[in-house]
C-alpha cells in the first residue's frame, strides 16, 4: 500500500527531528543543514528505514530532488505531527551518525554511493578517486585523503559499508 504525500511528510519530519534537525534551519539556514538532511535520509534508506527516496550523485554527494521538494514544502503542522518508529539497531546507528558534521556525512555518503555502484573497486582506489574529485572541498575544510581514510574506517567499524 502506497503512502499519501502527507503520511510521507509525517515520517520524514519524524526522522529529521530524530536526527536533531530543525525545519527552519534546513529550509532557511546554512547549506550544511541541507547536506546533513540529505545524507541522514540517504543512510536512513541504507538502513531500510521506509522513507521512500531515491538518490543520484551530485556536487555534495548523493542527492534526492524529491527529498528537497518535500522538506521545502513541509508545513509547520506536518513537522509538529511528524513521528517515526525505529528499531533499537537503527536508533543506535543513527545516533552515531547524527553527531557527525556535514563534511563527514558528505564524504561518507559519497563513498558509500560510489562503492555500491562499483563494488569490485577497492576501497583504496575509491578513496583516491573521491579525494581527487573533492580536493578543493576537503582543502577548504582543512582536510585531506587521511580524513577520507578515517571516514571509511569509521563506516566499516559501524557496519555501514
Image (spheres, grey):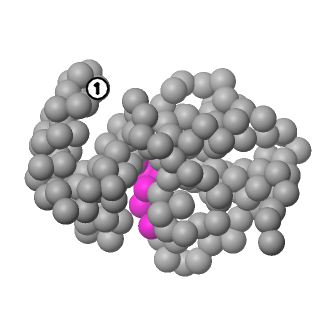
Residue 90 % position (x, y): 52, 71
Q: On screen, 38 above or below 151?
A: above
Q: Main secondary structure of the magenta part?
A: helix
Residue 83 % position (x, y): 76, 61
Left or right position of 89 against 115: right
- Quadrant holding the C terminus: bottom left
* Residue 58 visible (yes or no): yes
Please state the total of marks drawn on the protein image: 1
Residue 30 % position (x, y): 54, 24
Is residue 19 rendered magenta in the image? no
Left or right position of 106 against 55: left
Quarter of the image for residue 15 reads: bottom right
Quarter of the image for residue 160 reads: bottom left
Q: Dot 1, crowdedness within 10 Å: few (<14), some or many (≥20)? A: some
* Residue 71 visible (yes or no): no
Is residue 96 rendered magenta in the image? yes
As drawn, which residue projects farthest toward the bottom? 88
Left or right position of 106 against 34: left
Query: Foreground residue, 62 or 95?
Result: 62
Give the residue displayed 77% in from the left and 51% down from the top: 9
Quarter of the image for residue 70 reads: top right
As drawn, which residue projects farthest toward the right? 77
Give the residue displayed 62% in from the left and 72% down from the top: 86
Residue 33 % position (x, y): 54, 34
- Quadrant holding the N terminus: bottom right
- State which region is magenta: 93-100
Give the residue displayed 50% in from the left and 40% down from the top: 63
Q: Secondary structure at mark 1?
A: helix
Q: Which residue is mark 1?
A: 137
Query: Foreground residue, 27 or 42?
Result: 42
Give the residue displayed 49% in from the left and 68% down from the top: 47
Amino acid at each position: 500500500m502506497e503512502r499519501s504525500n502527507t503520511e510521507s511528510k509525517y515520517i520524514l519530519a519524524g526522522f529529521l527531528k530524530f536526527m536533531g534537525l530543525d525545519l527552519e534551519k534546513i529550509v532557511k539556514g546554512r547549506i550544511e543543514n541541507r547536506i546533513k538532511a540529505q545524507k541522514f535520509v540517504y543512510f536512513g534508506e541504507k538502513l531500510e528505514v521506509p522513507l521512500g527516496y531515491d538518490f543520484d550523485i551530485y556536487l555534495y554527494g548523493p542527492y534526492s530532488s524529491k527529498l528537497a521538494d518535500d522538506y521545502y514544502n513541509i508545513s509547520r503542522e506536518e513537522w509538529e505531527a511528524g513521528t517515526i518508529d525505529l528499531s533499537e539497531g537503527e536508533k543506535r546507528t543513527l545516533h552515531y551518525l547524527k553527531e557527525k558534521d556535514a563534511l563527514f556525512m558528505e564524504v561518507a555518503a559519497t563513498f558509500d554511493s560510489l562503492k555500491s555502484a562499483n563494488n569490485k573497486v577497492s576501497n583504496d582506489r575509491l578513496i583516491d578517486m573521491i579525494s581527487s574529485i573533492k580536493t578543493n572541498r576537503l582543502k577548504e575544510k582543512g582536510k585531506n585523503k587521511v580524513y577520507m581514510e578515517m571516514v571509511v574506517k569509521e563506516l566499516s567499524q559501524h557496519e555501514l559499508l
